[in-house]
Image (cartoon, rainbow, N blue to C red):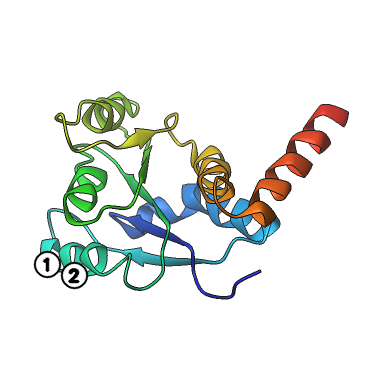
């Protein structure tokens, strides 16, 4: 399998890292190479633009974007890349993550962001691997094996 990152993970804050460790651990388990960056759509918009705009050129195939509260990160990233985006809404102290979830799933027409459950970092990793598996049989096999293991558990 490739050492070149295929999945990009972007999160709006360092405070998202404990939740997103489930994502990186699952990608590691599945053997999916990834890169990770912390950049806020609101505090670092130029960094987000630069990172997302060059993602496909760097060889990324899918992006996972984790954010809380207003949660615009996935949509902003989607505006700058043709790659599929998987949003991970972060649980928040204010509204329990419903604010994050609704911000992600209410994207305007033409700027799609797929969305997993609140704090659904592990599912984001599995879904990203399924996206890769659509054209890369080695990753499809990883998902088939994961599902076999879950069925036997």
Q: Residue at x 49, y 36 (%)?
A: 120
Q: Nearer the viewer, mark 2 or mark 1?
A: 2
State how many labels appear: 2
The percent position of residue 87, horizontal first and vertical second, equals 36, 40
Q: Residues within 10 Å of mark 2 (few under 14, many from 20)?
A: few
Q: Which residue lies under the disc numbered 1?
A: 46
When asked about the image quadrant of residue 35, the answer is bottom left
Going 32% across and 34% down the picture, which residue do you hit?
92
Q: Position of residue 25 (x, y in %)?
A: 62, 55
Name the one closer to the observer, 63 or 136.
Answer: 136
Asked whether, in this view, residue 33 is left or right of residue 77, the answer is right
* Secondary element type, mark 2: helix
For the point 24% across and 56% down, which residue is it? Answer: 81
Res. 40 image quadrant: bottom left
Is 45 on the left or on the right of 59, as rendered? left
62 with respect to 82 (left or right): right
Depth check, front residue: 85 or 110: 110
Quarter of the image where the C terminus is located: top right
Where, quadrant-wise, is the N terminus in this rendering? Answer: bottom right
User: Would you identify the image quadrant in which residue 43 lies?
Assistant: bottom left
x then y, percent, for residue 48: 20, 62
Q: In the rendering, which numbered label is found on residue 50?
A: 2
Q: CA distance from mark 2 to mark 1?
A: 6 Å
Camera-side residue of 117 and 84: 84
Q: For the point 37% across and 54% down, which residue is it?
A: 15
Determine whether 47 is above or below 111 in the image: below
The answer to whether marks 2 and 1 mark residues whose Cβ atoms lie closer than 8 Å is yes
């Amino acid at each position: 399998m490739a050492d070149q990152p295929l999945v990009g993970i972007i999160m709006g804050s360092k405070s998202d890292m404990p939740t997103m460790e489930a994502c990186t651990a699952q990608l590691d388990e599945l053997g999916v190479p990834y890169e990770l960056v912390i950049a806020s759509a609101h505090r670092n918009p130029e960094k987000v633009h630069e990172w997302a705009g060059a993602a496909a050129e760097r060889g990324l195939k899918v992006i996972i974007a984790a954010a809380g509260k207003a949660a615009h990160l996935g949509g902003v990233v989607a505006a700058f890349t043709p790659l599929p985006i998987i949003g991970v809404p972060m649980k928040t102290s204010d509204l329990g993550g419903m604010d994050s979830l609704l911000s992600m799933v209410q994207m305007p027409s033409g700027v799609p962001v797929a969305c997993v459950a609140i704090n659904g970092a592990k599912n984001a990793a599995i879904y990203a691997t399924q996206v890769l598996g659509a054209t890369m049989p080695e990753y499809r096999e990883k998902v088939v094996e994961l599902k076999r293991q879950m069925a036997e558990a």
